[in-house]
């Protein structure tokens, strides 16, 4: 019996081998290109969620409405047609969020027309912890930003959204830093604090310089049409969670909610780094 099983297994194996040879030869005769199978061991993709979790315990910017998740419909025992739905109550700049030019410029483009190609792509994460709350041009100049289009800043304010009390001394950019960012051609800047401007800023000048649409020939009378390509200055992402993320180059994906005419919107942001094994 064992001999019969061995013979059957050997015949089956030879048949598979012959079929594989025929398949390869037949494909080559027909001019088909054999596509090599890529081993899963060749590379791995690490996905890092850099979004702040939204809950009723999250710290919000001073004066902003708190985040609430109120029940609407609820499951009912014995009712197969019942379901859960909730009502979200929050500000447009809660947690991790994207600012739109309409945040500071009346009739300017809203978050719904921002260029998604700017919000997705290669980004450089720079660790500026230990430099204090003021991130100026000198601090940024200490890092290689050549060719960088998306700049993410890990600061001393990481974890701010988990604090019980809002810290008005959070990390922020100076006007000189904002001008440097514009000068070197950065298209997106993200920070792990609640704002790129200081809490004590009298005119939110950093926001305005980064979003200054005059350099793009912006016309208030015809906003979305004039900026049909979605180019709206430097896109600002605030409230990131970069805790434990090492400095380096990553692939960024940051997608804000598509709120028509929105001055800003919460976003889900992730980083991906592909590493060879």
Image (cartoon, rainbow, N blue to C red):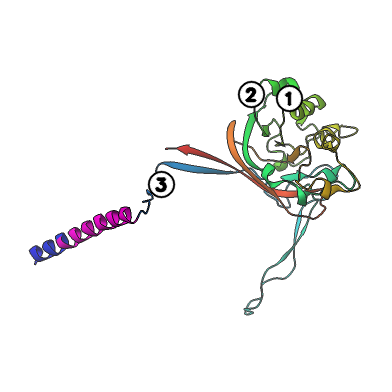
Q: Nearer the viewer, residue 88 or 59?
A: 88
Residue 132, numbered circle: 1
Q: In x, y percent, where is residue 143? A: 65, 23
Residue at image coords 36%, 53%:
31
Q: In x, y percent, where is residue 61? A: 80, 42
Q: CA distance from mark 3 to mark 2?
A: 33 Å
Packing grade of label 1 (10 A; few <14, some 14-19, many >=20) is some
Circle 2 sits in a helix, a strand or a loop, which is it? loop
User: Circle 2 is placed at which residue position?
Assistant: 144
Circle 3 sits in a helix, a strand or a loop, which is it? loop
Confirm whether residue 59 shows in the render.
no
Confirm whether residue 182 shows in the render.
yes
Q: Is residue 87 above or below residue 49?
A: below
Q: Is residue 2 above or below residue 59?
A: below
Q: Quadrant of residue 151?
A: top right
Tell whether label 2 touches label 1 (CB within 8 Å): no
User: Circle 3 is placed at which residue position?
Assistant: 40
């Amino acid at each position: 019996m064992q001999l019969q099983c061995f013979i059957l297994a050997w015949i089956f194996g030879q048949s598979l081998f012959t079929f594989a040879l025929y398949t390869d030869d037949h494909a080559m005769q027909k001019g088909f290109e054999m596509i090599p199978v890529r081993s899963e061991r060749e590379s791995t993709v690490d996905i890092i969620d850099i979004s702040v979790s939204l809950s009723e315990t999250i710290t919000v910017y001073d004066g902003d409405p708190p985040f609430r998740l109120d029940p609407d419909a609820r499951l009912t025992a014995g009712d197969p047609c019942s379901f859960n739905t909730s009502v979200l109550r929050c500000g447009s700049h809660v947690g991790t969020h994207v600012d739109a030019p309409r945040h500071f410029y009346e009739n300017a483009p809203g978050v719904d027309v921002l260029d998604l190609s700017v919000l997705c792509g290669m980004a450089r994460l720079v660790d500026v912890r230990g430099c204090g709350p003021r991130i100026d041009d000198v601090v940024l100049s200490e890092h290689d930003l050549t060719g960088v289009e998306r700049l993410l800043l890990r600061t001393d304010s990481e974890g701010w959204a988990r604090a019980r009390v809002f810290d008005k001394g959070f990390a922020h950019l100076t006007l000189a830093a904002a001008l440097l960012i514009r000068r070197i051609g950065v298209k997106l800047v993200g920070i792990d604090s609640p704002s790129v401007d200081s809490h004590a800023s009298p005119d939110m000048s950093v926001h305005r310089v980064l979003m200054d649409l005059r350099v793009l020939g912006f016309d208030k009378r015809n906003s979305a049409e004039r900026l049909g390509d979605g180019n709206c200055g430097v896109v600002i992402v605030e409230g990131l969670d970069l805790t434990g993320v090492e400095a380096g180059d990553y692939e960024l994906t940051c997608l804000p909610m598509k709120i028509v005419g929105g001055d800003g919107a919460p976003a889900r942001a992730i980083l991906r780094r592909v590493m060879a094994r």
